[in-house]
Image (cartoon, rainbow, N blue to C red):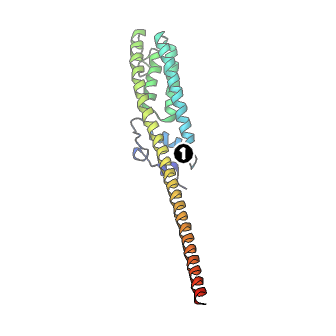
């Protein structure tokens, strides 16, 4: 039996418009492996749950940024980093790791110290970037699943057309048989009239 990676392809070419610069293909393919053979509902539910988590986390980040709560921003960055890593959203994952460090007043390397002012500047800029990166990934992932839905709808439409065509052919066949029977009956009646006239 073919694996989900074999069925859906390996790499960007087999996963719709998903780019390896946006989505970690190895992680996302592992997620698809957990789907049923018939559909992608399981992986889709995981991805949509991630969307909800990300949107809620961004709201909390905005509030924490407004109050200059660096420890909370670090915690939220750590949370969204893990959620993004689980579905392969690599740009958001990496940016959130930076936010996690900045919230602890450390630079990107996680070691060098930053002043509170510099940490706030860096985390403000990174939060703006990570929202753009998230929207990019969201569009790509929704496009991937929407394409699948459209394919299924197209197949269903073809099946319905085939069924309708079959029903029409059956109706035509029945009408033809009825016409043949009527013609036979008319012929027999005409022959009977001729025989009666001959007598």
Q: Residue at x 56, y 44 (%)?
A: 35
Q: Nearer the viewer, residue 186 or 121?
A: 186
Please state the total of marks drawn on the protein image. 1
Q: Residue at x 38, y 36 (%)?
A: 21
Q: Residue furthest bottom?
A: 199
Q: Is residue 78 visible?
A: no
Compared to residue 169, the image places residue 108 above or below, namely above
- The picture places residue 151, in percent across and down from the top left corner, at 47, 48
On the image, which quarter does residue 128 sit in? top left
Q: Which residue is mark 1?
A: 33
Q: Residue at x 41, y 16 (%)?
A: 124
Q: Nearer the viewer, residue 115 or 38?
A: 38
- The picture places residue 47, in percent across and down from the top left corner, at 52, 35
Is the C terminus in the top left, top right, bottom left or bottom right quadrant? bottom right
Compared to residue 50, the image places residue 152 above or below, namely below
- The picture places residue 189, in percent across and down from the top left corner, at 59, 79
- The picture places residue 198, in percent across and down from the top left corner, at 58, 89
Compared to residue 67, the image places residue 191 above or below, namely below
Is the N terminus in the top left, top right, bottom left or bottom right quadrant? bottom right
Q: Is residue 84 visible?
A: yes
Say what secondary structure mark 1 lies in: helix
On the image, which quarter does residue 45 sit in? top right
Q: Residue at x 49, y 32 (%)?
A: 85
Classed neighbour count for the residue bearing mark 1: other residues with Cα under 10 Å, few (<14), some (14–19), many (≥20): some
């Amino acid at each position: 039996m073919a694996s989900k990676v074999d069925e859906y392809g390996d790499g960007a070419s087999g996963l719709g418009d998903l780019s390896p610069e946006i989505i970690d293909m190895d992680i996302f393919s592992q997620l698809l492996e957990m789907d049923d053979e018939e559909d992608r509902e399981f992986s889709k539910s995981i991805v949509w749950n991630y969307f909800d988590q990300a949107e809620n986390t961004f709201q909390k980040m905005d509030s924490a940024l407004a109050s200059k709560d660096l420890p909370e921003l670090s915690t939220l960055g750590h949370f969204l980093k893990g959620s993004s890593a689980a579905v392969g959203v690599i740009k958001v994952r990496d940016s959130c790791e930076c936010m996690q460090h900045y919230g602890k007043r450390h630079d990107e390397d996680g070691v060098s110290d930053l002043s509170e002012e510099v940490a706030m500047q860096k985390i403000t800029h990174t939060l703006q970037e990570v929202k753009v990166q998230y929207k990019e990934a969201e569009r790509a992932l929704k496009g991937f699943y929407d394409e699948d839905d459209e394919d299924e709808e197209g197949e269903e439409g073809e099946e319905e057309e085939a069924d309708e065509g079959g029903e029409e052919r059956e109706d035509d066949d029945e009408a033809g048989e009825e016409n043949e029977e009527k013609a036979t009956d008319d012929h027999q009646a005409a022959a009977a009239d001729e025989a009666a006239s001959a007598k």
